[in-house]
Amino acid sequence: MFSCCSPCPPCLRGEFLSVIFAFHLTLALAQTPAPATQPPGIAIERALAERLHLAVGDTVRLGASPDSLLRLAVVAAIYEPRPDPAEISRRALRVRLHLPDLADLLGASDRVDRFGIGLTPGVPADSAVAVLDRAAFGFRAHSSAVIASESSQTFKVVSRFHRAIAVITIVASAVFLLCIMLLKVEERRMDAAVMRFVGVRRRTIFGALVLEAALIAVLGSVLGAGLAFLAGAATNAYYRRFFDTELIFSLITPRIVLFSVCLSLLLGLAAGAVAAWRLVRTRPMVLWGRA
Amino acid sequence: MTGLGWGLKSLRRRPLRTALSLAGIAVASAMLLDMVMLSGGIEQSFSELLLARGYQIRLTPKGTLPFDTEASIRGASTVVREIRAEPGVEAAGAVLGTSIYGRTADSLVTLFGYGIQPEAQGIYQVTAGADLAPGDTSGVLLSETAAALLGAAPGDTVTLVGRLDPQIAGAAVGRRLAVRALVRWIYDHRGQPSVGTVLPVMQRLGRETAADRGSLLLVKATDDREVDALAARLRERFPELEVNSVAELVVQAKRRLVYFTQLSYVLGGMSLVVAVLLVGTLLTITVNERLGEIATLRAIGVSRGTIVRQVLAEGVALTVLGAGAGILLGLATAEYLDAILTSFPGLPEAFSFFVPRAGTLSLSALVLLATGSLAGLYPAWLASRAPIAATLRAEAT
C-alpha cells in the first residue's frame, strides 16, 4: 500500500507495521437491492449499530460527504471499542474498513495518516526516531512514549484541577473540623468546672477531652469513608451511563482512604487539644460563669 | 440596641470561635462563588468567543462541528455566493483550515494555514500592519508565534509550501508571499503558529483547489432576532451541511464540558451545606450558652419576635462578614483555577472557564444571605421557646 523513499535502516526492520488512515465518513442505510458482486465488509462500533439499528449482514452506503453516498458496504462485524478517556466527550462514531477500501472510497490511494512500527527487541525507540527523522521528508517520527505523554496532557490538566479543588476542600474541612471541635469542647465548660471543683487534675480533664475529640474524629472518618464509597459508586454509575462507557470515574484506593483518615484524625486531635488546653487553663469559677 | 448590633456584640464575646467560623464561611463562600462562576462561565466565554466578530451562524460538513474533523465542504465559494444572496444575510465567508509548512533558512516548520475571504472574515483581528485585500494572492497574515518561527515581520517575504511528498523528497507546491500583517487568530490555542492567505492560495497549498473546499462557512445576519429563522432556512436549503447558530454551538460545547458544570453544582451545593452547618452550629451553641440572658430579656418584657430577630441578625452578620472575605478569596482562587483549566491542549487562548460577572457575584451573595438566614432559623426558634421561669431558676442555682 505504501512505499519508502529509501531502504529502511537495519535497526528499524520491524516485527510488524501498521498503517492508519482516518477520515470523516458519512454512512446511510442502503435502500438499494444487493448487487451482484459482494460489497466490501466493514466493522462498526456498537453505539453506531444501536443508533442506526444495524445488525451483521446489513448493507449500508458510505461516502466522504452526504451528497456522495455511492459505495455499498456490508456490516461484517460489530465491535466494542476500547474505552478511551480522550474520546469520551466527543462521542465520535467509528467504522472500520480495510485500508484499500477506504483509500478507494476517498480517491486517495497510497496515502495514509500514520505508520506504526514495531522495533526488534533491544532497539531504543529514541534512537530509532532520530534515525527516521534524519532520513524522513514529509513526515515526523514519534516514540509511543512521547505520543502517550502528549495525548495525556488533557488528563494532567484535569488532575491538576482536581488537586487544586482537593486542597480548597481540605482547607474548608480543616476549618470546619477545628470550629466544630472547639464548640464541642467548649460545650463541656460546666462539666470541666465541676471536675475541677471535685479535685480532678487538669491533665486528666485534658486527656479526657482529647480522647473524646479523637473518638469523634475516628467515628467521623469512618462515616466519611463510607459516604465517599457511596458517592464514588453513585458517580461511577451516573457517568458510565451518561457517557455509555466502562471507564472508571471515581477510584477510591486504600492510600486515599488512609490519607483522609490520618488527616482528619490529626486535625481532630489538634483541634481537640487546642480547645481542651484553653479550657483547662481557665479558672473553674470562670468556667462556672461566676467569676 | 438593634438586632444587628446585638448580633455583632455577641460575636465579639468569643473571638476565637467567631474567627474560626468566619474563616470556614469565607472558604465555603469562595468555593461557592468559584462554582457559580464555573457553571455559567463556560457558556458565557464560549458565546463571547463565537460572537467576537459578530458572525452568528456556522456551516460545517454534515455531522461535524467547526474544525472537529478533517471533513470539508465542496464548492465552498459557490455556497457562499448563494448564502450572500439570501435575504437577511449581511455577510458570509468561507474558511479553509489545513496543515502547511514554512521554509526557514535551514529547515521547514509546520504551520496551520487558514484560507479566508478577507471581505467577510470572522476569525482574526489585525494587531500590526494592514489587512489582506480581497483578491490579494501575494499577501499573508501571520500570528505572533508564526512570525517568530519564520523570523518575519510585516513587509518581509516568506515561503510557504504544502503537501510534502516523501517519495520525491520535495514539496508539491510552494509560494513566496509578502507579510501584510500580524494578527490574533481568535480560535487559536496558545502558541499556535498560524498563517492566513486568501482562500484560493490556501486551497492551492493544501491541494483543495479542484473541489473548491472549505472547512467552515460563517454567516452574519442583519438582525440578531432573525438568526434562528435564517439558520432554519439555510438548513433547509443546504441539507448536506450542518447549520448551527451560536446558541446551538454553545449547547454542544456545554454538552462536551458537562463534567465541569455538574462538578460545579455538586461542589457549590457542598459549600452551602458547610456554610449552613457552621452558622447553624455556632448559633445553636451560642443560644444554649445564653439561655439565661435570653430568659431575663423575656422576663423584662422583650418580645419573642425581638429575640428571633436578634438571633437571625447574628446569623446574617456572621454570613455577611464571612462572605465578604470569601468573595475576595473566591476571585483569587478562580484566577488560579482558570489558569489550570485554560492550559487544556487545543483550547482557544481567549477561552475562560471562570468569568466574574456582576450577576454571578450578586447571585452568590443572595444565596449566601438566604443560607445564613435559614441557618439561624432553628437556633432562633430554640431561643424563642426557652421557658422563662425554669431557665431563670436554673441560672440562679
Image (spheres, coloured by chain):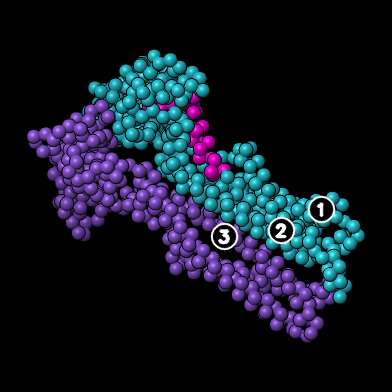
Chain colours: A purple, B cyan
Disc 3 and disc 2 in contact, CB within 8 angstroms: no
Q: Is residue B262 left or right of residue B147?
A: right
How far across and how far down the image is residue A252, in percent?
Answer: 45, 63
**Amino acid residing under circle 3:** Ile
How far across and how far down the image is residue B338, in percent?
Answer: 52, 45
Vertical arrangement, residue B18 with respect to residue A199, above or below: above
Vertical arrangement, residue B360 with respect to residue A219, above or below: above
The residues colored magenta run B37-60
Q: Residues within 10 Å of mark 3 (few under 14, many from 20)?
A: some
In the image, which disc is placed on residue A170?
3
**Amino acid residing under circle 2:** Tyr
- Mark 1 = which residue? B305
Q: Chain of mark 3?
A: A
In the image, which disc is placed on residue B378?
2
Q: Does label 2 lie on the same chain as label 3?
A: no
Q: Is residue B34 left or right of residue B206?
A: right
Gap between marks 3 and 1 measured at Cα: 39 Å
Vertical arrangement, residue B7 with respect to residue A137, above or below: below
Gap between marks 3 and 2 measured at Cα: 28 Å
SS category of the residue bearing label 1: helix
Q: Residues within 10 Å of mark 2 (few under 14, many from 20)?
A: some
Residue at figure coordinates x 23%, y 36% from the top left: A29
Disc 1 and disc 2 in contact, CB within 8 angstroms: no
